[in-house]
Image: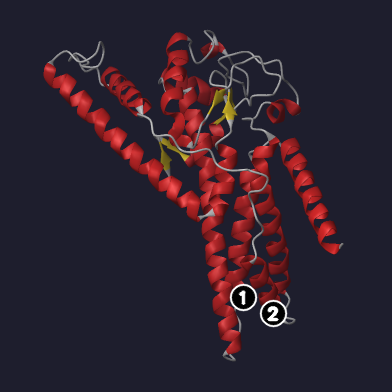
Amino acid sequence: MVMFGWNVAQLPIVAWLLVSPNSKETPLVLSSNRRDLIQQIIAVSTVVTTASPYPANAEADTGSTSSLSLSASEADGENALESLKPFAPVSALLPATRARLWIEEAYQISTQLRNNHDQYHTLERLDHVLSHRPTLFRNGEKLAPRVSSTPLAQFTAKRSNLVASNRNQNVNSRDPFASGPSSLADKVSMALNQADVARQWGILQAQESRTESQNELRAAWNYYTQQLEFNPSSYEWTASAEEKKRRIRSDELPTPQVVIVSDLDLRDLYRNQMLTALDDVYAEVQYQLKQGMNGNGLEVTNTIDLMDQAHGACNKWFDMIDKRDVEEAQLMVQKEQYQNQHSYSR
């Protein structure tokens, strides 16, 4: 899957130095999803054009694996990455954590299907859990409204790509965007391009808003990513020094906006994999129960595999979050569940 020119397989090359609560850097607050980089990306582009994305002596670096950042970080050791990951309040993680505990319960039941003893009863239990998802949003928690805005970032990216393409191909013709449109035709073309992108942006926003209103699970995951804060001027290089030098020579080092978009795209990929697997496993369980009622044999392999996929994708999504935040959110939800059960038992 290619995302803004970057393949998912290439994502491990860079990892965000996460914004810690005590960071002196001004974080970038993403107002909605990855496409909401629109206005913020312009500010990021300013950082990119005013500061080199690598040290002046980077090419002389001969270390095995080196870090590459636009601003210095005092964090080091094993806790460096955990304390500097993209940051969001723990409260933003509560809806997704409620869903995760529900998925975990369903997963544990599905593992019992591996034993041939009373598979039909186990399928009934799994169906009951999947059919009774807990309320994910409580105490006034709700997604912020999606505000449509002009995606100037896409135009900026097109201009940047055009300049790079002309430079790499040694094109002698003048870049029409180097100092703005030089003719009326250029101005009209630019305006039409921006209008078309803005129209597509509005359509995407409306579609995502409708999807969230119809799918509380999707909304729970978006509730967290909507509140993520990134440091727009720092990332760490995690590949080899040789790969870093090669990219420096070919002018292919990722920019901060590419890293941000790649990070959010990967989160969305895991979310979508989980949602698809959950839909499929629910349909499969329903089908197998009907088969059992009709006296046919049960085939639970697909049910087990699909539940494994949903559980695995969910865990991968949470693995991108500071483990201390994950643990704190889980304790809060478990305490919440205990209090609810205790109040019902009275």
Q: Is residue 254 visible?
A: no
- Residue under pointer 1: 300
Q: Position of residue 82 (x, y in %)?
A: 71, 31
- 322 left or right, relative to 206: right
Q: Quadrant of residue 148?
A: top left
- Residue at point 79% right, 55% down? 340
- Residue at point 59% right, 13% down? 71
- Return the residue nearer the eye: 319 or 251: 319
- Residue under pointer 2: 119
Tell me the amino acid under the disc marked 2.
Gln
Label annotation for residue 134: none
| Crowd tier of the residue under label 1, counting other residues whose Cα lies within 10 Å: few below 14, some 14–19, many 20 or above | some
Q: Is residue 79 visible?
A: yes
User: How many numbered marks, from 0 up?
Assistant: 2
Which image quadrant: the C terminus? bottom right
- Residue at point 22% right, 16% down? 175
- Residue at point 64% right, 32% down? 88
Q: Quadrant of residue 123?
A: bottom right
> Element type at marker 1?
loop
- 337 left or right, relative to 298: right
- 52 left or right, relative to 22: left
- Which residue appears farthest toward the bottom when viewing the image? 295
Spatial CA span between label 1 and label 2? 8 Å
Q: Position of residue 72 (x, y in %)?
A: 63, 13
Q: Earlier in the sequence, mark 1 or mark 2?
A: 2
Tell me the amino acid under the disc marked 1.
Val
Are discs 1 and 2 less than 8 Å apart at CB? Answer: yes
> Element type at marker 2?
helix
- Return the residue nearer the eye: 190 or 234: 190
- Return the residue nearer the eye: 216 or 15: 216
Q: Position of residue 167 (x, y in %)?
A: 29, 17
